Amino acid sequence: MANRSDSKILSAKVIVALDYADAISALKLVNQLDPALCKLKVGKELFTTAGPQLVEKLVAKNFDIFLDLKFHDIPNTVSKACEIASNLGVWMLNVHASGGSVMMQAALEGVSKTSHKPYLIAVTVLTSMNQASLHEIGVAVSVENQVLKLAKLTQGAGLHGVVCSALEAQLLRQHLPNNFLLVTPGIRPANANLDDQSRVVTPSQALQMGANYLVIGRPITQAAKPIDVLIALNHEIQHGL
Ligand code: C5P
């Protein structure tokens, strides 16, 4: 699977979301962090402005990178994009499960062509969607049932896991194998600002609910001392509150 040292993969469960509009701001934060304490997520905003060069720079700094580009396109295009992303040396990348199993298998084929073999996971239902927004695109089942259906489709296609709300992790853990990765945003330490997140859980709760990795952005990136928050988060993860 991923070609990083096992100890680093096992130790760092926090994935810091680098939601920045330019590389300089992102690197200013990254230079205060430690690859033994966290992984990093590069999403569409930062990737669009800073591109593959920044990803390669972060990989060279020994960080595990989750490239959160949520590919969703015709299978051939997704396959090629995943192969190229994989060759950047990322640790994890993702596609939209709603692209279907043929698209997801094409994504897997793309990463399999490279020697890096990152984790390939899928987004089930965006956390910004609700019953009404599913209904308007013709999905008549509940959010939970749609999440479960797409997670099973993802597992059947051979991918390594899904991005889901921690509140959905419990349900998914009951229906999917133990080694299926659950990567969860919507995490807030007790008493932290919610920002635009509506339903949040603490890091310990998310892990108890079955999450493997926790995507955490603003509680770390907006902190006066990001490294202190990260150390406290890792302490909570290892020892409980
Ligand atoms: O809120 P925070 O800064 O911790 O966000 C971390 C990540 O969670 C973001 O990069 C985004 O991928 C995701 N997110 C989400 N729902 C929101 C806001 C952010 O899933 N309402």
Image (cartoon, grey):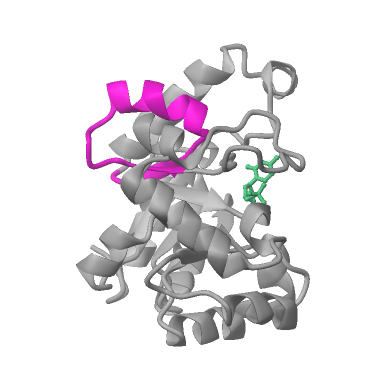
What residue is shown at x 50% (from left), y 26% (from top)?
A: 167
Where residue 220 sits, quadrant-wise, is bottom right
Extent of the magenta region: 158-183
Image location of residue 32, percent across then percent down: 58, 78
Q: In this view, does 172 lie above or below 118?
A: above
Look at the image and say whether residue 38 sits in the magenta stretch.
no
Q: Nearer the viewer, residue 73 or 71?
A: 71
What residue is shown at x 70% (from left), y 30% (from top)?
A: 198
Name the side, left or right, on which 37 lies relative to 144. Answer: left
Q: Nearer the viewer, residue 53 or 109?
A: 53
Q: Can residue 160 be seen in this view?
A: no
Q: Which of 160 and 214 is in front in this view?
A: 214
Look at the image and say whether residue 172 sits in the magenta stretch.
yes
Image location of residue 66, percent across then percent down: 48, 63
Name the side, left or right, on which 180 lies relative to 100. Answer: left
Image location of residue 34, percent across then percent down: 46, 75
What residue is shown at x 54% (from left), y 78% (from top)?
A: 55
Q: How many labels does the image show?
A: 0
Q: Can residue 1 be seen in this view?
A: yes
